[in-house]
Image (spheres, grey):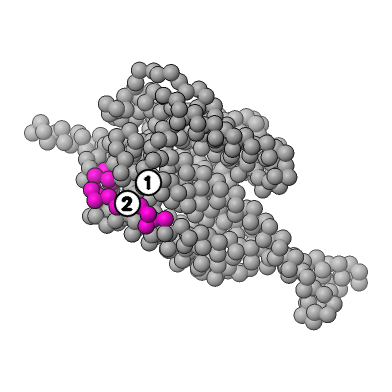
């Protein structure tokens, strides 16, 4: 009877830990995108410029990318449970401060603090969930965790749009507070650190490593976030920070390979599967965040949808991913090779991208997106868990946490690269297509002249004078040309995304399968 009571108590504790860790991971992921739809309200309320309010996103992303590779080391320094609890507290307190910010730079500073707390939640919560389950059940735990990571970026925009429409922008931060308080109390009560995750005797701190890592990834993230807006390398700040990032990365690698107590153990990258996994994690982040960025942008700028309508469009993909996660978890535990699932997911994402290329028009119907996004949802479900298990399947002990930090960082950087590259290519393709289309508006082009004459007659009938009608007709035609150029540019982006996923699919074949599938599944969620 005592043993049965102990099992019930253990199962209850494990369920509480799972819910706590997933909520914390989901909070962090949602916060990366929830502010996007509130920026305009923040700008008006705080009296900020468009450039200034952009730092609300940039500061959070920079803090995230800096802290993620340091999580394994910090967990060893302070103990995993203590570090996790402190990270939740930092995130929760920063959320309150963000909602109470009185000017834009206060908000930016508090968002940076929030990013430092939030970035640590991802890798740590993944590790805690895994350690709470016996090996035969960890595959499903990994699937549940992956569900939060994949659908989090999708939930952000519609949730943010609803809150802004029905309350005010500070409440996108205030909703974190009650969840954070409960999660902190539950963590202190139920989470336990394993022997190797307990607080260690302090070694000499690698301050140079911390400084070089912060400079390298912080400068790189700034370049990626602000490059297009600041016209890339024609801007002196971008040039200087690009040099700082490259030099700091070089010195950081040298430092970590020669120092006896490095803050990031780079030697773990000698593992071939982890190297391939970091590449695939980068591509996953590129596709996940890039497509989550490009589809709402298209529907709002071209089709005229609201932020909430655009966010809701992504719900079918999120639901499909939710449906796929436990299926993929079961397939992996039954021994289906990760490589096959990853290859299938990559090809499905390529199909989604080519499908998007085929359906985009200046007035695409909402129903046209449904099956395309369901394909995306299936593809994402087939990518996240297999890529994670493939990356970490041949690592052991503390190497697993170190490898998880690399894959997490590369997924985040992939998203940053994806958004930066998409923004840049989109802007330049629009200019190119606009120039090509506008070159056809000549006096000897009968179709163009017919269109201009029709617009001129319409404006004249509405009371415009001759010269004003002619100028107005050219403006309307140019607006129509610009919209068509934009559609063609979005089509190009979808085509390039599809080609990217097709090109990188062969990388999967270089990975070694893990014969001990259940064991790898047991360790993979670290």
User: Which quarter shows the N terminus?
Assistant: top left
- Whole-percent x, y for residue 214 in the image: 54, 31
Residue 182 covered by magenta stretch:
no
Side (left or right) of 225 relative to 134: right
Q: Are marks 1 and 2 in contact (CB under 8 Å)?
A: yes
Q: CA distance from mark 1 to mark 2?
A: 8 Å
- Whole-percent x, y for residue 236 in the image: 72, 39
Q: Residue at x 49, y 28 (%)?
A: 255
Side (left or right) of 368 relative to 431: left
Q: Identify residue for label 2.
A: 512
Give, as a single range, the part of the protein colored magenta. Answer: 507-522
Q: Is residue 411 visible?
A: yes
- Whole-percent x, y for residue 131 in the image: 28, 36
How many numbered callouts? 2
Residue 315's place in the image compared with 259, above or below, is: below
Q: Residue at x 23, y 55 (%)?
A: 334
Q: Nearer the viewer, residue 399 or 292?
A: 399
Q: Residue at x 82, y 68 (%)?
A: 474
Residue 460's place in the image compared with 381, above or below, is: below
Q: Identify residue for label 1.
A: 272
Dividing the picture into quadrants, the one containing residue 138 is: top left
Residue 426's place in the image compared with 43, above or below, is: below
């Amino acid at each position: 009877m005592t043993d049965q009571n102990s099992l019930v108590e253990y199962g209850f504790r494990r369920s509480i830990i799972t819910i706590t860790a997933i909520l914390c991971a989901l909070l962090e992921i949602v916060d990366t995108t929830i502010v996007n739809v509130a920026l305009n309200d923040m700008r008006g309320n705080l009296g900020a410029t468009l450039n200034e309010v952009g730092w609300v996103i940039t500061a959070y992303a920079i803090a995230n990318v800096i802290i993620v590779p340091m999580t394994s080391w910090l967990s060893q320094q302070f103990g995993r449970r203590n570090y996790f609890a402190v990270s939740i507290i930092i995130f929760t307190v920063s959320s309150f401060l963000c909602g109470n910010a009185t000017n834009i730079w206060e908000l930016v500073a508090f968002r940076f603090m929030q990013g430092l707390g939030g970035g640590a939640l991802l890798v740590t919560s993944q590790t805690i969930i895994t350690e709470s389950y016996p090996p035969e059940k960890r595959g499903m735990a990994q699937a549940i965790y992956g569900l939060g990571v994949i659908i989090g970026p999708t939930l952000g925009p519609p949730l943010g749009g609803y809150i802004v429409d029905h309350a005010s922008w500070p409440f996108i931060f205030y909703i974190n507070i009650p969840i954070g308080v409960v999660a902190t109390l539950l963590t202190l009560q139920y989470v336990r650190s394993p022997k190797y995750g307990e607080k260690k005797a302090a070694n000499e701190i690698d301050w140079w490593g911390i400084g070089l890592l912060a400079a390298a990834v912080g400068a790189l993230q700034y370049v990626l976030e602000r490059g297009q807006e600041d016209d890339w390398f024609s801007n002196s700040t971008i040039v200087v920070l690009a040099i700082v990032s490259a030099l700091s990365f070089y010195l950081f690698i040298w430092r970590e390979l020669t120092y006896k107590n490095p803050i990031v153990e780079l030697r773990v990258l000698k593992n071939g599967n982890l190297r391939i996994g970091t590449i695939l994690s980068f591509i996953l982040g590129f596709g996940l965040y890039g497509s989550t960025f490009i589809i709402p942008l298209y529907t709002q700028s071209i089709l005229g949808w609201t932020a909430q309508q655009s966010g809701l469009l992504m719900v079918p993909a999120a639901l499909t991913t939710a449906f796929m996660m436990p299926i993929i978890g079961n397939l992996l535990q039954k021994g289906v090779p990760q490589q096959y699932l990853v290859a299938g997911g990559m090809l499905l994402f390529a199909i989604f991208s080519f499908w998007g290329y085929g359906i985009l028009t200046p007035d695409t119907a909402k129903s046209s997106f449904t099956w395309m996004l369901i394909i995306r949802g299936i593809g994402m479900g087939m990518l996240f868990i297999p890529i994670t298990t493939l990356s970490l399947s041949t690592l052991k002990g503390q190497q697993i946490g170190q490898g998880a930090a690399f894959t997490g960082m590369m997924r985040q950087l992939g998203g940053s690269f994806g958004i930066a590259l998409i923004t840049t290519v989109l802007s330049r393709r629009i200019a190119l297509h606009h120039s090509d289309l506008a070159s056809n508006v000549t006096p000897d082009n009968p179709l163009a002249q017919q269109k201009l004459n029709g617009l001129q007659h319409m404006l004249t009938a509405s009371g415009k004078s001759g010269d004003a009608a002619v100028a107005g007709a050219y403006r309307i035609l140019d607006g129509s040309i610009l919209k068509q150029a934009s559609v063609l540019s979005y089509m190009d982006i979808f085509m390039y995304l599809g080609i990217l996923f097709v090109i990188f699919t062969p990388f999967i074949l270089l990975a070694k399968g893990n014969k001990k599938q259940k064991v790898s599944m047991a360790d993979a969620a670290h």
